Amino acid sequence: MNALLDNSTPSGKALSEFLKKYVTSIPDFSNVPLPETGLLDGMEEHPFNMTHFDDMYDTLLYSRLISRAIELFPQLQTIIDLGAGSSIPTLIALNNLKDQRPRVIAVDIDPKALAISKQNAEAVGLADHYSFKLGSMQTLLDSEIFKSPGNLIVSNPPYIPTPQGVEDYHLIPVDGGEDGTRYVQDILQCEYPRDTMLALFWGSLCNPSLVIPIMEERFEILHVHAVKVHFGNYTTLPVINTHLHELRAKGLIVFEDAPGRENQIVIGTILKPRRTS
């Protein structure tokens, strides 16, 4: 399967068994050239073009996951994007569609992110397909929006483990709590309406021994893809990197500590609730 997976730890075993069920290989995505989109990404007042970064693999892979979910859900009318940020992944997915495009409700806690999202939607001529909602994931999961059947919920939530007491504005988009599962658990434990589909993007830094049992108990797993990628800018920050190594030593997360290069596995899953409200 992949030398990165270690069956001697709780999370390594859980992740190895999960991936063996659903994928035949885990390709290395670390050196794949990223396409130019001309769209803006970031939470800063002066956002960067996405191709200024060398670790935006998640944007491209997440967009492919959304596209696959749309293929599996041909009668789809509405996509709810939890933590939409710049909306680049949904914009790429919708822009590639030849037939009727669904509407997107883009949700984010940061008004600057939604402003960038709106600008991107206008740039590709898809503004009419988008509406924007300011709010947290937790608030939305309890809102009226989720009572309508037949939605596709998509999310690439923050899942980088971050130690308590670290207050850094730049970490907000990735801070998944101490073991990376804060938001992923909320999403997986929500009671969804009938005929809902969930496209969830997460990774091996998000305590697989905790995430996978919840996922397998509550959902039918329709699709999984997994790739190996190098650590990005956030995970190489000293305060984060030290914390990740501590969690790895405890067997709670999975990554490869190669000389001069640390790699993780990012995972796209398309899920259908087993129990519906």
Image: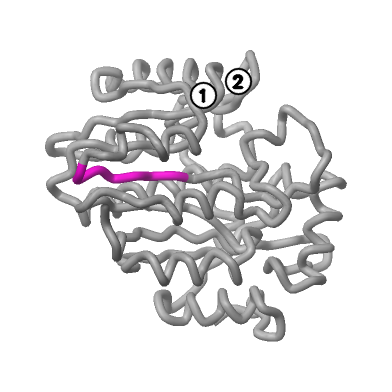
- What secondary structure do most residues of the magenta stretch adopt? strand
Image marks 2 and 1: residues in contact by CB distance under 8 Å = yes
Secondary structure beneath label 1: strand
Please tell me whether mark 2 sits on a helix, a strand or a loop: loop
Q: Where does the magenta region start and end?
A: 149-155
Along the viewing direction, whichever of 277 and 218 lies nearer the viewer: 277
- Residue 167 screen position, x and y as percent: 79, 32
The reply, left or right, for residue 253 in relation to residue 83 is: right
> Within 10 Å of the Cα at label 2, are there few (<14), some (14-19), or many (20+) other Cα atoms?
some
| Residue 176 colored in magenta in the image | no
Query: Mark number for residue 47?
Result: 2
Residue drawn at 71 percent across, 52 percent down: 161
Q: Quadrant of residue 10?
A: bottom right
Residue in the picture at 22% in, 39% down: 148
Q: What's the residue type where badge 1 is placed?
A: Leu
**Residue at 26% across / 50% down in the picture?**
196
Q: Dot 1: within a 10 Å radius of its alpha carbon, few (fewer than 14), some, or many (20 or more) residues? A: many
For the N terminus, the image quarter is: bottom right
